[in-house]
């Protein structure tokens, strides 16, 4: 670990479990990064596994991260700016959860807090205690995942929250809530843009894209492929993760795209036997 971060006791890692999270694939993603690049952009931030790896390994790396999920973006800024207040709120959730987990979980799920701290602590609390750690909202934007079967969920991971807060404070990270296409106005020649969008379904039952109340559609995928071409013409390095689906492979079949098929597990499948043996695509233009 770099000397500059000696005061960090633990290496920062994602503070939420997110569908399609990339923590397990960091070694492969790391191998596929360009040798050098300018600003790092990640417009589908999610759990931020690659971001935290980047900030830990590359001291001084300039990053611009964004997501369309406003609660998630708020969580990153809250952890950066007010981590102690957040931890105190999470400890309160933990205490109440231990008294009566079921009724407390559903009361918090039904709640609509107004303050920055309570909004973020609600998101993390639900993520830690809901079924499979799955973040999903319905068409009205309401979180709708049932209670998970945990005996002792890790609701307050203090060490990691402090590590995340420290690395976000001490690094050149710009955090925004916006649509992925906005990156075109900011990315310059030599920058790296990593796209990890909600995946195209590989089967009729595999369609999961409910991070926001707007599903990620085939039209969005088409927008994304056009955006990738625009970024390529600007001289940007483009790296894209997606499902091993014919639609995705067809869209990126021509030059300048190079497609690699990699093995990945699915941590949120409700059937644990179906979590392994999956493949996904890694697509790049360099």
Image (cartoon, grey):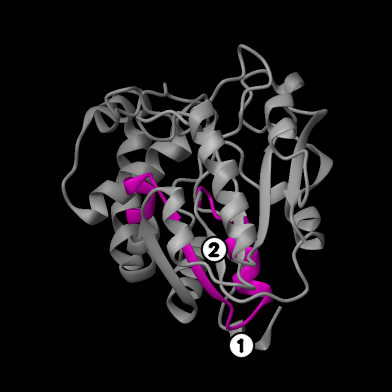
Using residue 202 as the reference point, say whether residue 127 is left or right of it: left
- Left or right of 84 on screen, residue 243: right
| Residue 25 to residue 216: above or below | below
Q: Residue at x 45, y 50 (%)?
A: 181
Q: State yes or no: residue 21 in magenta.
A: no
In this view, the mark in front (2 or 1): 2
Screen quadrant of the N terminus: bottom right
Q: Is residue 51 magenta?
A: yes
Q: Give percent across and percent down for residue 143.
A: 34, 29
Vertical placement of residue 55 versus 146, above or below: below
Identified at 38% across, 42% down, the residue is 125
Q: Which residue lies at the image location 49% right of the left edge and 55% below the top edge?
A: 157
Residue that numbered label 1 is attached to: 4
Provide the secondary structure element on which disc 1 rests. helix
Range covered by the magenta-colored residues: 45-74
Mark closer to the chain start, 2 or 1: 1
| SS for callout 2 | strand
Tell me if I can see residue 13 in this picture: no
**Disc number placed over residue 214 in the picture, else none:** none
Q: Quadrant of residue 285?
A: bottom right
Task: Kindly indicate the quadrant of the structure image that contains residue 136.
Answer: top left
Above-or-below relation of 235 to 199: below
User: Which residue is label 2 attached to?
Assistant: 41
Q: Position of residue 90 (x, y in %)?
A: 34, 51
């Amino acid at each position: 670990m770099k000397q500059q971060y000696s005061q960090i006791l633990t290496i920062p890692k994602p503070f939420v479990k997110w569908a399609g999270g990339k923590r397990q694939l960091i070694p492969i993603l790391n191998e596929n990064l360009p040798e050098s690049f300018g600003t790092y952009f990640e417009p589908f931030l999610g759990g931020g596994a690659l971001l935290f790896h980047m900030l830990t390994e590359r001291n001084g790396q300039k990053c611009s991260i964004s997501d369309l999920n406003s609660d998630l973006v708020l969580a990153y800024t809250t952890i950066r700016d007010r981590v102690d207040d957040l931890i105190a709120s999470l400890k309160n959730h933990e205490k109440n959860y231990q008294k009566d987990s079921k009724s407390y979980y559903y009361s918090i799920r039904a709640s609509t807090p107004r303050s920055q701290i309570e909004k973020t602590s609600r998101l993390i609390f639900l993520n830690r205690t809901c079924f499979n750690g799955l973040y999903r909202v319905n068409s009205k934007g309401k979180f709708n995942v049932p209670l998970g079967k945990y005996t002792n969920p890790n609701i307050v991971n203090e060490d990691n929250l402090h590590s995340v807060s420290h690395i976000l404070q001490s690094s050149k990270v710009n955090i925004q809530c916006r649509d992925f296409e906005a990156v075109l106005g900011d990315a310059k020649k030599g920058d790296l843009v990593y796209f990890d969008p909600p995946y195209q379904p590989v089967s009729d039952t595999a369609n999961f894209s409910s991070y926001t109340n707007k599903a990620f559609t085939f039209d969005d995928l088409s927008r994304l492929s056009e955006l990738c071409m625009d970024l390529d013409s600007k001289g940007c390095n483009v790296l894209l993760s997606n499902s091993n689906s014919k639609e995705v492979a067809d869209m990126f079949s021509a030059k300048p795209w190079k497609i690699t098929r990699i093995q990945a597990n699915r941590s949120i499948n409700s059937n644990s036997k179906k979590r392994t043996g999956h493949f996904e695509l890694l697509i790049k233009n360099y």
